[in-house]
Amino acid sequence: MMKKLIMAFGSALMLISCAGVPGTSQALENANILILGEDADTDTVPRNSRVFKRTLDAMADELNNQGFRIFDETAVTMDMAQGRSRRADHELIDIAKSISRPPIDIGVLFQIYGSAKDKSYKTNLKIRVSGRLLNIRTGQRYGNFEYESPREWYAPRNCQRDCLLEAVGKYSKILGAEVASVLGEKLRETVGDGGAGENAGQPDSYSLIFSGFSPNQILDIEEYLVVFTGYKEHRPGYTGNRRAEFWYTTHSKHSRLLRNIRKMFSHLGMKAHVSASGNEIKISRI
């Protein structure tokens, strides 16, 4: 009976889209990616350096341009009050595993090494950026790559702190983009297009939080969520007796998603209060 109601609901609202449901040939086809800097080694450039930031931005831009879904560490770890430098690998991986909005699938971990040797007429620079791909959930490695600066790269003679930071930052972002380019190719070979195909578009993701609903009611709601127009995927987060959270990805606009949620409850014969702030949508049973 419930399936018939759902099909009628989908037909009435024109919510079923044959082209909107993604294929399942790749387990990580729609991977959420987080770039993390490894700086526990005191020989590496620390996280709080402008060199680090320029390199990180260059890597994120490159992977974004390839169509992958990249999330900013600061933005998705606001509740953890992150900001420390010199973090060990196990801490970075634990941070990535702890993020639920969105759940992180793949970590891009990178390191920056830099040194300078002053000569009478110039300052020789030696810079290296290395990166690796890690499945955050399973620990599986998908590959690594490193790129060193050519001998022709140098800074002016008597190049002091600010001068060196600018010179090293200028070159390290080039190396970072190159490393990200190769890692992107390795990632695509491993998990497919990562949602980067021509038909993928640019989906948006939302945190859906349901309060006051029983587990059976949540099951009914979940069956409706997957037939909304533009549906791409959803992942369960916390689930309890009266609360359930989902990370929901769709091609639909924010306003249309809200309308569909409200119509869903009307069709289910339930009363609910729906509120939204940014990408968080809270639904409370009345």
Image: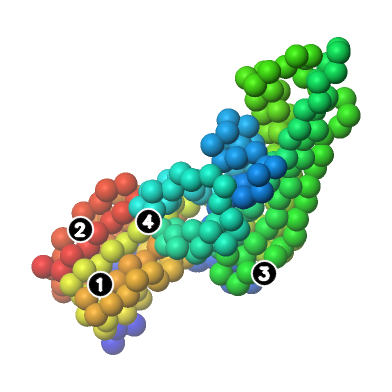
Q: CA distance from mark 1 to mark 4?
A: 16 Å
Q: Earlier in the sequence, mark 1 or mark 3?
A: 3
Q: Position of residue 198 (x, y in %)?
A: 62, 50
Q: Residue furthest bottom?
A: 1
At numbered mark 3, what does the secondary structure look like: helix, strand or loop? loop
Q: Read off the residue under disc 4.
A: 206
Q: Quadrant of residue 150 in the image?
A: top right
**Which mark is drawn over residue 140?**
3
Q: Residue at x 28, y 77 (%)?
A: 240
Q: Residue at x 18, y 72 (%)?
A: 212
Q: CA distance from mark 1 to mark 2?
A: 15 Å
Depth order, front residue of 90/231: 90
Q: Read off the residue under disc 2.
A: 274
Q: CA distance from mark 4 to mark 2?
A: 14 Å
- Image vertical order of residue 173 relative to residue 190, above or below: above
Do labels 1 and 4 touch, CB within 8 Å?
Answer: no
Q: CA distance from mark 2 to mark 3?
A: 39 Å
Q: Residues within 10 Å of mark 4 (few under 14, many from 20)?
A: many
Quadrant of the image for the N terminus?
A: bottom left
Depth check, mark 4 against mark 3: the one in front is: 3
Depth check, mark 1 against mark 2: the one in front is: 1
Q: Earlier in the sequence, mark 1 or mark 2?
A: 1
